[in-house]
Image (tube, grey):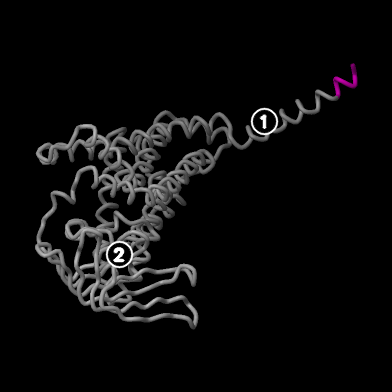
């Protein structure tokens, strides 16, 4: 019996030790603080997009009904709208959750009690830092996911079908598989185009880059036929190939003339890698790409701001007892408005090339980070 007793007691003791170590890292106070933050974060992160949906329905419902869209299709389009709307609101959701959770604990003297028990303010809000890091990761995922859901939403709303049917001149279109089309003139009545450059960036000899240039192109039932042009295939070694052609059928050029007119893809419809390929193609053509460089860097900067904004909001939240809930709402809304205004301002400044586009994208985060670190260092721990 003693042998059995020893054999079974060792695993139990080991399990108890692991549980004790886990409890040292995550204690009931941590779970309580995180649950308070998480509840408000989810409410804000989902509540604001729902509000945007209600506003959009109010403004555009008659337009959608005139198109004869089925209700199920319209409802699904708004489901696809959630990732893009959540992406922009995540920093504000972290701010609201930080201000209201810490503010509530300040008013109820819970932070004071924790300090009296030997728990510093920094250790007390560690679970909120964990929640902010989760928000950063979620934002990075949404930033890559949203372009694809935006594209699907436009398809459900049949935007291309009801878009303007006028001709277009001197524009670029980012197609699938990393292809970029630069078109001098597109004529819908004749379904023809003038001055087409098609570029695709490859990865090596097995998937080479190429540039096709054609003086004219015509759309046929089986696709686009290029005329009077040159094809340059770049393999990355001495075997690069260049040839001319009188006529070339491009089976990957599947977009109809109406689609090229209606839906030149915006940065919100391209993920980070697609936007990077688009920028490089535009740079080779001599086009000013500053505004696209800002948009690409914002796909990283905005999620990271969720962590930066915590440094700003946590010290201010300890003062919410002065004005209660109204004070917290005021701080959160004012900070959110200022942040969104700074984003638009830096887009304009970076897009004009007044400063580096990448720096312009990070300026709001840098500004809030500096202020936040200053305030954070002054908090009584």
Answer whether residue 2 is magenta in the image.
yes
**One can see residue 229 in this view:** yes
Report the span colored magenta: 1-6
- For image coordinates 38% across by 57% down, the residue present is 301
Q: Nearer the viewer, residue 7 or 282?
A: 282
Determine the secondary structure under disc 2. Answer: helix
Kindly report which numbered mark, 1 or 2, lies closer to the viewer in this rendering. Answer: 2
From the viewer's perspective, tell me whether residue 365 is left or right of residue 246: right
Q: Which residue is mark 1?
A: 19
From the viewer's perspective, is residue 188 above or below residue 37? below
Quadrant of the rendered structure where residue 106 is? top left
Q: Is residue 111 visible?
A: no
Residue 82 in the image: above or below residue 20 = below
- Disc 2 crowd rating (10 Å Cα; few below 14, some 14-19, many 20+) is many
Q: Which residue is mark 2?
A: 292
State if disc 2 and disc 1 touch (CB < 8 Å): no
The residues tagged by marks 1 and 2 sit, at their Cα atoms, a distance apart of 50 Å
Residue 262 is tagged as none
Q: Quadrant of residue 192?
A: bottom left
Q: Please identify the quarter of the rendering in which residue 59 is found.
A: top left
Quarter of the picture holding the N terminus: top right
Q: Which is nearer the eye, 169 or 364?
A: 169
Left or right of residue 104: residue 193: left
Residue 74, image x and y in percent?
Answer: 21, 36
């Amino acid at each position: 019996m003693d042998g059995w007793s020893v054999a079974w007691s060792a695993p139990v003791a080991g399990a108890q030790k692991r549980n004790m170590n886990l409890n040292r890292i995550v204690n009931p106070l941590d779970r309580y603080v995180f649950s308070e933050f998480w509840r408000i974060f989810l409410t804000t992160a989902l509540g604001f997009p729902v509000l945007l949906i209600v506003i959009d329905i109010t403004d555009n419902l008659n337009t959608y009904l005139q198109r004869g869209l089925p209700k199920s299709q319209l409802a699904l389009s708004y489901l696809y709208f959630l990732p893009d709307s959540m992406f922009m609101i995540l920093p504000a959701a972290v701010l609201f959750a930080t201000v209201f959770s810490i503010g509530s604990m300040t008013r109820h003297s819970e932070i004071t009690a924790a300090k009296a028990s030997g728990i510093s303010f920094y250790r007390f809000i560690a679970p909120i830092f964990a929640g902010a890091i989760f928000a950063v990761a979620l934002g990075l995922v949404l930033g890559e996911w949203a372009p694809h859901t935006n594209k699907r939403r436009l398809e459900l709303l049949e935007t291309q079908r009801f878009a303007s049917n006028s001709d277009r001149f001197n524009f670029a279109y980012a197609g699938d598989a990393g292809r970029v089309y630069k078109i001098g003139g597109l004529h819908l009545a004749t379904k023809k185009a003038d001055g087409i450059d098609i570029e695709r960036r490859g990865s090596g000899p097995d998937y080479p880059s190429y540039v096709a240039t054609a003086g004219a192109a015509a759309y046929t039932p089986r696709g686009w036929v290029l005329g009077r042009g040159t094809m340059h295939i770049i393999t990355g070694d001495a075997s690069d190939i260049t040839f001319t052609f009188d006529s070339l059928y491009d089976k990957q050029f599947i977009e109809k003339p109406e689609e090229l007119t209606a839906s030149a893809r915006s940065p919100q419809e391209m993920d980070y890698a697609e936007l990077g390929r688009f920028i490089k193609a535009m740079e080779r053509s001599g086009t000013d790409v500053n505004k696209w460089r800002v948009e690409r860097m914002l796909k990283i900067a905005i999620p990271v701001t969720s962590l930066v904004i915590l440094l700003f909001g946590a010290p201010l939240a300890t003062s919410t007892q002065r004005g209660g809930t109204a004070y917290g709402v005021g701080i959160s809304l004012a900070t959110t408005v200022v942040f969104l205004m700074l984003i638009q301002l830096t887009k304009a400044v970076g897009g004009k090339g007044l400063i580096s586009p990448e720096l312009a994208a990070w300026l709001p985060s840098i500004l809030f980070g500096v202020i936040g670190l200053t305030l954070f260092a002054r908090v009584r721990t």
